[in-house]
Amino acid sequence: MTFGFASPSHVPPPASADSARLGRMLEPAEWASAGIPLLRNPREVVADLHDRHRPGPSTAIVAVLDAQERVTASASFTEFAVSPDGWGFRNVLLAHLRRVIPHDLRLRAPVRTAVLLYCREGEPRWTETDGAWMWGLRDACTLHGLRCGAYITLTPDRWQVLGEGRGGRRPRRSPLDEPSGEPTGVSHREMRRTTAALPDAPYAAMGIPAQNRSKPRRTGGGAPEAHRHTAAR
């Protein structure tokens, strides 16, 4: 005879790692109902990011757009995942966002939008990997004070904005754009960062030496420089 305590029937068994991983992904219907703002011109955004980063297979490009949908910062990186997990994707996206742009957590409402373009093989339809990237992008935007924007897949033939019906042909590079001595089709993966122009940038561009640059003139107290005092006779 053995004695012990039976676990209550209403307590669910512990979740496996795989079921937890599957819970960290979004399906197209969930993504479409999340209120993701639509891009006014997704073709221009895709062409701009493709020209900046020239992505190859398994390359992700995260970009931050301003209110006019201009790219203010972007980073590209290669991410291979046998078992895609939104948690891991969230962490890597957040790390790259922190490197290229300050957070907006102090603002009451987000003013900038983050979008993600993922280059992969296969068909443009939704996959589990896409669902994990969607989950990761949404969570990373929340933690960085950004508005979660579009998720775009880039396959060998076309680009597709998942969660909506817009898509088009994949941008092509001209052979004239290839660097000399490098085989055509080699992709460049690099992290890019945008910074504000320094105050001396216009002078440097015109070739004016530092010692010849005009400096602002200061006057004390706002008194007119031509003010004269005459002695009493």
Image (spheres, helix red, strand yellow):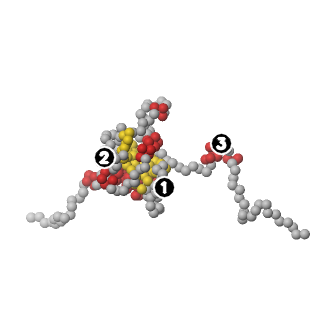
Residue at disc 2, secondary structure: loop
Please rate how many residues cluster around mark 3, counting C-alpha atoms within 10 Å: few if below 14, some from 14 to 19, many from 20: few
Quarter of the image for the C terminus: give it. bottom right
Residue with the most extreme right position: 233
Q: Disc 2 or 3, which lies upstream in sequence? A: 2
Q: Residue 102's mark?
A: 1
**Residue type (three-letter) at the residue carrying disc 2:** Trp
Residue 103 in the image: x percent, y percent? 46, 57
Residue with the most extreme left position: 1
Quarter of the image for the N terminus: give it. bottom left
Q: Tell me the distance, in whole angstroms, between the alpha carbons under discs 2 and 3.
A: 53 Å
Task: Give the residue drawn at x 47%, y 61%.
Answer: 107
Q: Disc 1 or 2, which lies upstream in sequence? A: 1
Q: Tell me the distance, in whole angstroms, between the alpha carbons under discs 1 and 3.
A: 32 Å
**Side of 14 relative to 195 (left or right):** left
**Residue type (three-letter) at the residue carrying disc 3:** Gly
Which residue is identified by label 3?
Answer: 207
Q: Which residue is nearer to you in this view: 44 or 145?
A: 44
Q: Is residue 25 visible?
A: no
Residue 212 in the image: x percent, y percent? 70, 47
